[in-house]
Amino acid sequence: MDSPSGVETATPPLPSTSRERLMTHALASVLAGSVLLAGALPVQAADYPTRPIRIVVPYAAGGSTDALARMVAEQLGPRLGQAAIVENKPGASEQIAITSVTKAPPDGHTILLSTLSGLAVNPGLYGARLPYDPLKDLTPVLLAATVASVVVVHPQVPAKTMAELGTYLKANQGKVSYASAGNGTPSHLGMEYYKKANGFDPVHVPYKGGAPALQELMGGQVQLMMALVPEAMPMVKSGRLRALAVTSPKRLAAYPDVPTVAESGGKDFDMTFWYAFMAPAGTPPEIVSKLNHAIDGILQEKDLRARLAEMSLDLAGGAPSRVTELIRSDSARWKKVIDEAGIRVD
């Protein structure tokens, strides 16, 4: 400090005991602050939720993903004491919805219901262009449900089994067309996987969604498709399409007479579509656990299980780690199919 005379004088040093007391006091203050900060998170988690919960869905209203989200939301609000609101954000192969959730506060008030496509297929399709990393930018909450696809053909196709379809495809190489819900969708990847494993060469015709693809198949513009069971089986029941096999590892309880692709000669074939609840990365584990237990409990409700069984959805549940394992395994599996088939998206 400056003296009145303008001559700088040195401040005498504190005795060692005084310095030790000050350091001890400062250290105690830091530790106390750390304890307070550490204790703040569990308190917030215990109070969660404090406002309505948004469930972001990457598809328009009316589809299976939207229906599943709304059924859960209907019961999630009463269980957690706050309203649960479904918000549809379709577009860009789930990227719009997923990116919005990765940027939301990680406090459990914004969660996502995504699928195999957004979480495990997109990384292989878009690579560095994908604006999110499913394993780094999101936190898994729960594997909600799975659903199989079914290989369906136009009634004029002379095949009633997968073996007969194989014979038909070999005899008409390059002349048979198959429909998909779009480039890079499960209906596209599943057929490419099947083609390569068997040496067939049907021509791919992509559409903008499963519904228009099935309409064209019923009209005879294309000959076959690997479509989601809930979308295709009503047309099979009406006689407008013929079902040859389901793509799940086991036969479906709702359609026990339809064999699997695997038992029809497609060894180890499995094209199972799945739905998973996710939260922004950094969401406190206590909040993730609270959401996991609440949604898992909802999925066990008898009425809900019956409603989803009508949609051919198999409810899953369990620990969040199940989602992480699926993302890792399916990402590697479908990236290989994408690379080998040379699939590209604009």
Image (cartoon, rainbow, N blue to C red):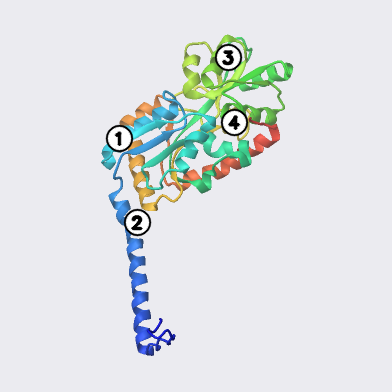
CA gap between label 1 and label 2 equals 26 Å
Q: Tell me if I can see residue 305 in this picture.
A: no
- Which one is earlier in the sequence, the residue at label 1 or at label 4? 1
In the rendered image, the quadrant that contains the C terminus is top right
- Which one is earlier in the sequence, the residue at label 3 or at label 2? 2
Look at the numbered disc 2 and give the secondary structure of its residue.
helix
CA gap between label 1 and label 4 equals 37 Å
- Tell me the mark number nearer the camera, choosing from 4 and 2: 2
Name the residue carrying label 2: 41
- Tell me the mark number nearer the camera, choosing from 3 and 2: 2
In the rendered image, the quadrant that contains the N terminus is bottom left
Name the residue carrying label 4: 262
The dot on residue 217 is: 3
- Tell me the mark number nearer the camera, choosing from 1 and 2: 2
Name the residue carrying label 1: 75
Amino acid carrying label 2: it is Leu
Point out residue 292 in the picture as x, y percentages from the top left corner. Answer: 37, 44
Q: Which quarter of the picture shows residue 50?
A: top left
Look at the numbered disc 3 and give the secondary structure of its residue.
helix
- Tell me the mark number nearer the camera, choosing from 1 and 4: 1
Point out residue 248 in the picture as x, y percentages from the top left corner. Answer: 53, 31
Q: How crowded is mark 1: few (under 14 residues within 10 Å), some or many (20 or more)?
A: some
The dot on residue 310 is: none
CA gap between label 3 and label 4 equals 24 Å
Indicate left or right for 201 with 52 as reference. Answer: right
Q: Are marks 1 and 4 in contact (CB under 8 Å)?
A: no
Residue 86 position (above or below residue 181): below
Residue 329 position (above or below residue 39): above
Q: Are marks 3 and 2 in contact (CB under 8 Å)?
A: no
Amino acid carrying label 4: it is Ala
Look at the numbered disc 1 and give the secondary structure of its residue.
helix
